[in-house]
Amino acid sequence: MTTNQLVQEIKKKKSFLCIGLDVDLNKIPPHLLKEEDSIFAFNKAIIDATHHLCVAYKPNTAFYEAYGLKGWKALEKTINYLNEKHPEIFTIADAKRGDIGNTSAMYAKAFFEDLAFDSVTVAPYMGKDSVEPFLAFENKHTILLALTSNQGAFDFQTKTVDGKELYKQVLETSKTWEHSENLMYVVGATKAEYLADIRHIIPDSFLLVPGVGAQGGNLQDVCKYGMNNQIGLLINSSRGIIYASNEDDFAKAAALKAKELQQEMAIILNK
Amino acid sequence: MTTNQLVQEIKKKKSFLCIGLDVDLNKIPPHLLKEEDSIFAFNKAIIDATHHLCVAYKPNTAFYEAYGLKGWKALEKTINYLNEKHPEIFTIADAKRGDIGNTSAMYAKAFFEDLAFDSVTVAPYMGKDSVEPFLAFENKHTILLALTSNQGAFDFQTKTVDGKELYKQVLETSKTWEHSENLMYVVGATKAEYLADIRHIIPDSFLLVPGVGAQGGNLQDVCKYGMNNQIGLLINSSRGIIYASNEDDFAKAAALKAKELQQEMAIILNK
């Protein structure tokens, strides 16, 4: 999918919501545990109930790997279901991968070719040659960790490196990499005030913003500082939506929560 | 496995060799492609031929994920084979994971419980709460990326942060984390002269050292600067050993290459 197609979809749905599909078998409605593939059954119900309210889905691979082969199979079924039923929706493998060049190329193959995700999250610690193999894929997107939403972000990311915070060095350095037009960035909502500075460095890039809702970030602030003239934001919510209820009505409850966020977004977009 | 058991195994075998099981179906002997599970068939042959010469095996997860479900199944069979046949051998999931706390806990479960690896490699970019869920597992080891062996290491890792290189900040900060006694570190052999400084910060920790052989690092230099009184080194070689031949004799050729390295190590240990 091209960035332009994503922008069109945002305008059409009046939503820049991304729903995180982080399936924890301890949290889903108990009646689903009887299903042959409980993880996929949960995802399918969530997708069926919310696809008109969001423009992206983001399964975090950790939640699938934790269930071994069964989990990997559910991930495969989920992405296939999305690509068949809703090819207009942007898909993100939240995998936070990164390795030396030839190895990163294997990860890129896994997520872009075999699983056919539109994008994958990548960690920057190993530098240029660990990220460029992902960037080489046309119309695929590499979402680089810049400033994450957790407390540990302050351990290294906000430390000053040669006169500038590490996450800003990551932003600036990454702009010099080959096919940097395929970069997007993770920027946590819990640090919305940082977004103004970030927009000076990368005015045009899409930002994937976790941390709205469960982690305490505020949508209005994020939009105020982070939105650009192509919107340029994907706001992720995971637990706040998918675990709104763990009764029979879980999918409906998820849709209600998604709709709340979508309507807030529509008001912002209509301004 | 405890660190002490690993040290005993090193002394017994006179080897601190780790063999990287990075299976690429384009590089393995063509006759293996007829096998039902070519990846596992390759690994089993390599393990059978080399287990007496090394103390650790390290599958890099990228090479398995690139083959989807088939790859994940082969990884599972490989670790199960190692744990059944050679429980005295230290196993490393080279996965370079790391995410916010509750998500890192899922990765830790995946690699330490379901797959029952002794250790996993983890990226430090997201800080303390992304690493501590791994450290919480008793007698399991978290191998933190410090200074990697690739060119991209110079993009951020060696940059100066508050008067000290980032990788040194990672080493020092990580020592303050809960259960830091379960930490080991990745330090590339291509930067052997950095090892003296590193040993000042973490005198007692084990170092996993990639980059000897194919990536140009030198074993003598690594040992000169990096060895401590408990040896404290695992030297990894992947391509140099497992792809020594792609004919019928591949396992024998791998054993010969492994033996060359083991004999060099025995001389160093006997000094």
Image (cartoon, coloured by chain):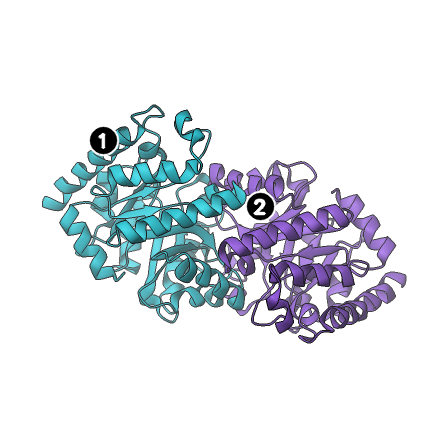
Chain colours: A cyan, B purple
What whole-number distance in Å separates the C-alpha atoms at marks 1 and 2? Answer: 43 Å
Numbered mark located on residue B173 in the image: 2
- Location of the N terminus of chain A (image quadrant): bottom left
Q: Which residue is drawn at 35% across and 42% down?
A: A20
Front position in the image: B89 or B101: B89
Q: Which amino acid does label 1 sit on?
A: Leu
Residue A207 at x, y percent in the picture: 30, 52
Which quarter of the figure has residue B45?
bottom right
Residue B59 at x, y percent in the picture: 63, 57
Residue B1 at x, y percent in the picture: 74, 42
Numbered mark located on residue A256 in the image: 1
Q: Mark 1 lies on which chain?
A: A
Which element type, helix, strand or loop, lies under badge 2?
helix
Front position in the image: A197 or B227: B227
Numbered disc in front, either 1 or 2? 1
Q: Residue at x 37, y 37 (%)?
A: A41
User: In the displayed structure, would residue A53 be above or below residue A247?
Assistant: below
Label 2: few (<14), some or many (≥20) within 10 Å?
Answer: some
Which quarter of the figure has residue B187?
bottom right
Which quarter of the figure has residue A43?
top left
Residue B266 seen in the figure: yes
Residue B18 seen in the figure: no
- Location of the C terminus of chain A (image quadrant): top left
Left or right side of A234 for A145: right
User: In the displayed structure, would residue A29 be above or below residue A8?
Assistant: above
Label 1: few (<14), some or many (≥20) within 10 Å?
Answer: some
Q: Residue furthest right?
A: B270
Q: Mark 2 lies on which chain?
A: B
Left or right side of A204 for B162: right
Q: Residue furthest left?
A: A271
Q: Which amino acid does label 2 sit on?
A: Thr
User: In the displayed structure, would residue A165 be above or below residue B23?
Assistant: above
